[in-house]
Image (tube, helix red, strand yellow):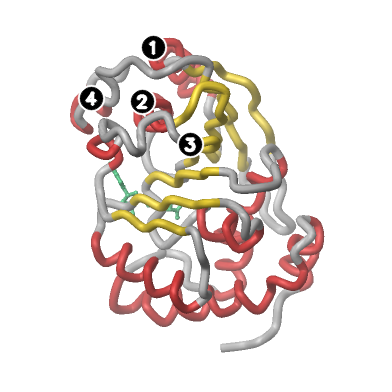
Amino acid sequence: MSEEVSTAFQAGLTHFGIAESAAAFLRYRDELLAWNSRFNLTAIKDPEEVLLKHFLDSLTLLQVYDQPGAIHVLDIGTGPGFPGLPLKIARPDWHVTLIEATGKKTTFLRHIVDTLQLTNVEVLNVRAEELAHKSPYRAQFDLVTARAVAALPTLLECSAPFCRPGGTIILPKKGELADEIKQGKRTAFRVGSHFQQDIEVTIPGLDDGRRLLVWEQQRLCPPQYPRSWAAMTKQPL
Ligand code: SAM
């Protein structure tokens, strides 16, 4: 596939101080699209759109959270790696754990981690609500994120148990969110999180109301959470 990077994408990489990472992102994009026909990894098939709507969109988290060193990051329901893997490419010192319920997606994730020779990336084929009750993972992460996985109350109930007190949860969302945020705040109170910010993000050429909802984990999440996926989605806290 083409070696060219669009001006908009290159400007985005430059903005985040990672202009030299263009080759890694192109390789990731090419592998994603090559595997897509067999593994159904993404609905976005246009090569330029992958750069903007997957990679640049993932990198926007750096606008609200960008710390040096071995930050422990968890991406829940990462699919083919979003937003966790672009963040790892951008910030190689970070330790990134990717959890994904679908085996074929974790097969792709392991392939791309090998291909790009990324270190300190853990790929787990598990359900978040089960892993969250296991002590090596509970309350361990500095930053927890999940993009396009569920409604806010479910995402918060799933994310908060993984986040250490003082840590941050960033949930990228799109569109009209007033009711969801109201419900999310109720859930946050129960799981020890507190709403911090609703930040609009802009990506060149995209005007679809992308936002980052930022929460602080103020205390340990009570041990009964998360509940089963059915309970979280049908009876939100
Ligand atoms: N985060 C990626 C993105 O933004 O492109 C993928 C989004 S995709 C719509 C949702 C992903 O979450 C799917 O790959 C699905 O298998 C995964 N998923 C859903 N529920 C999950 C759970 N309880 N635990 C782990 N992964 C889950």
Instruction: Give the residue at mark 3.
Output: 141
Contact, mark 4 vs mark 2 (Cβ under 8 Å): yes
Instruction: Give the residue at mark 2.
Output: 157
Pointer 1 local density, CA inside 10 Å: few below 14, some 14–19, many at least 20: some
Q: Does the residue labelled 4 lie within 8 Å of ligand 1?
A: no
Q: Where is residue 115 in the image (x, y as percent from the top left)?
A: 47, 78
Instruction: Give the residue at mark 1.
Output: 190
Label 1, label 2: how many angstroms apart (C-alpha)? 9 Å
The nearer-to-camera label among 3 and 4 is: 3
Circle 3 — which element?
strand
Q: Position of residue 13 (x, y in %)?
A: 74, 63
- Amino acid of disc 1: Arg
Vertical order, 78 against 50 (above or below): above
- Amino acid of disc 4: Arg
Occupied quadrant, residue 135: top left
Circle 2 — which element?
helix
Label 3, label 1: how many angstroms apart (C-alpha)? 19 Å
Vertical order, 153 against 203 (above or below): above
Counting residues from the start of the chain, the first of labels 4 and 2 encountered is: 2
Pointer 3 local density, CA inside 10 Å: few below 14, some 14–19, many at least 20: many
Counting residues from the start of the chain, the first of labels 4 and 1 encountered is: 1
Identify which residue is drawn at 41% across, 62% down: 80
Instruction: Give the residue at mark 4.
Output: 227
